[in-house]
Amino acid sequence: MPQRTSITNPSSLEVLAEGGASKTENEEGGPQVGQRWKVAWRDGTVHLAEIVDIRKAEGSSDAATASAAAKAGSTERGKKAPGTAAAGGEPSRSSSAGGGGAVYVHYVDFDRRLDEWVGMERVDLAAGQQRAVAHHNGDKRRVTTRMKRKYDEMGSKSGHGGGGDREGLDANIAMLEKEHEEITKVKNVQSVLLGKFEVETWYFSPYPDDYSKLDKLFVCEFCLKYMKRESTFTRHRQKCTMRHPPGDEIYRETAEGGQGCGVSVYEVDGKTNKVYCQNLCLLSKLFLDHKTLYYDVDPFLFYVLCEVDDAGAHIVGYFSKEKSSPEEYNLACILTFPPFQRKGYGKLLISLSYELSKREHMVGSPEKPLSDLGKLSYRSYWTYVLMNMLRDYKGELSIRLISNMTAIKTEDIISTLQSLNLLRYWKGQHVIAVSHTTIDECLNKSSRFKLCRPECLTWPVELED
């Protein structure tokens, strides 16, 4: 189960109870799509939530029947000890439908990965419908490179170019965002079995219709083929001969002392291994909100990180990058799957992307804009690298020299130093002003970093004659 994590939201929301809504209206209509109600979360705490979708009870012919059942459930919940209602966790599709229907809710001011189906007994009907007055502080849409490309394609098909038309760009991006939000607002797969882990999903993924609306999806951890039924999955495991991702193994790090799992990274070409990479994108979309690449994988390379034992190479995470990036991006998408998070694998993947850039004699940067969590991960990595360099380097340092030595773009170096308040204006120029105490404090916070070891990287791969 994912941790409940609050996200920073620039829009402040003032929640007001709708005293004007009549009791008859709430009892007869019940929660409707788009309304906001107070809903009990799994730990028993109550949060404001927006109704995204509704599933009526089995045998229910109208909303009034579902509402009556919901009222009865709410009354019964009120007789129990606090937190009892949440003890059962998320209702299954069959049980919730039979117990008065269910609603799919988005908890206001929380990440969408916490959206879920809840039984009507968890909706606080006594509190009445809530309404929110939003105060917006700017447009926070994430305009990715692939969204811009999609807009350009739309413009070329309609006979209008995308360049220079800012109003047209904004309008089309807004349309793409609205289309994306409408399609992905409800999770279509509730959990996925990957290796020995059953993982609760976070977001919608565009699997084929036959594989949507499932309580559980079965995925082979080696070939990433997905299946609907456990029996099919069991037969596949007996026949599947793959024990590691396709492509070339470019990184191998053995476990310390020979105990535990080693780590390997495989470079997989999206054009050569199209089906595998498409399946990887579909799987990762279950845990990434703003991923838009699913099937057009030809222009990308995928670097798949695995834990290796006697049974094979078990997928842990990956990052992708364009084979040729005009913007000099060295990373397009990155993910560590939930069972392996908080183990340092994310920083290992980030450091590997920069080590590849060094081997190419280039500077690089992740595709912008970064998500909030992505910005935190990269900022901590950049801080660690810069503090190590400032501590160990003897002689004069310039931003340009730091960029050439670390493969980090100058813009990212400057923004990191500014966030640490280490840039000063002195005698007509900007200088880095940092004490040994500040360096030690920053490095102590990063003592658990797991970075790639350059000596374990074999890249570029030498072709055999």
Image (tube, rainbow, N blue to C red):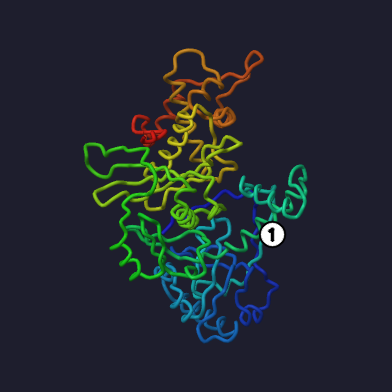
The answer to which quarter of the image holds residue 421 is: top right
Residue under the point 53% across and 29% down = 363
| In this view, 422 is above or below 153 | above
Position of the C terminus by quadrant: top left
Q: Label 1, on which residue?
A: 133
Q: Position of residue 249 (x, y in %)?
A: 36, 41
The percent coordinates of residue 74 (x first, y second) are: 50, 77
Q: In this view, does 234 lie above or below 392?
A: below
Q: Which residue is drawn at 54% across and 35% down?
A: 365
Total numbered badges shown on the rendered structure: 1
User: Image quadrant for the N terminus?
Assistant: bottom left
Figure check: 152 above or below 127 = above
Q: Locate residue 300, reporting x and y percent.
A: 51, 45
SS category of the residue bearing label 1 = strand
Q: Residue furthest front?
A: 465
Crowd tier of the residue under label 1, counting other residues whose Cα lies within 10 Å: few below 14, some 14–19, many 20 or above:
few
Of residues 410 and 208, the one drawn nearer to the viewer in this rendering: 208
What is the three-letter code of the residue carrying label 1? Answer: Val
* 160 displayed left or right of 7: right
